[in-house]
Image (cartoon, helix red, strand yellow):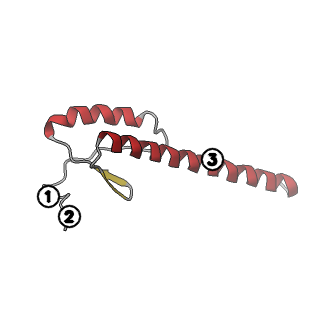
Amino acid sequence: LQGRAYFLAKKQRLEQQSATEAQQQAQLAQLQAEIARCYPRAQVAADRIYLLVHHDELDQLQHRYQQWQRPCSDWLLQLSEALPPYHFVEE
């Protein structure tokens, strides 16, 4: 591509990238709001969300996790193993 066609293609690529980033941020905000609704005491830290869940509620968490994954196609959600006791205690 040369001249005007090059700049038009570059502009379209930047607009597409901006739209994709906006969609990702909207999905993230929606996911965080839904998690906060279900688990009001959730802690957000950078790219992680910590939940304090009783052992009896693990099946319910798995079900919700699958529901959260569907509308968030641009994100990879993962549940990790339980953290050690007192991990959530602030100093």
Label 1 element class: loop
Which amino acid, mark 1? Answer: Tyr
Which amino acid, mark 2? Answer: Glu
Which amino acid, mark 3? Answer: Ala
Q: Residues within 10 Å of mark 3 (few under 14, many from 20)?
A: few
Label 2 element class: loop
Q: Residues within 10 Å of mark 2 (few under 14, many from 20)?
A: few
- Which residue has dot 2 on it? 90
Q: Are marks 1 and 2 in contact (CB under 8 Å)?
A: no
- In three-dimensional space, the C-alpha distance between marks 1 and 2, rounded to whole angstroms, equals 9 Å
Give the image quarter of residue 44.
bottom left
Q: Which of the two residues, 87 or 13, is positioned nearer the viewer here?
A: 87
Q: Which of the two residues, 80 or 21, is positioned nearer the viewer here?
A: 21
The circle on residue 19 is 3
| Foreground label between 1 and 2 | 2
The residue shown at (48%, 38%) is 73
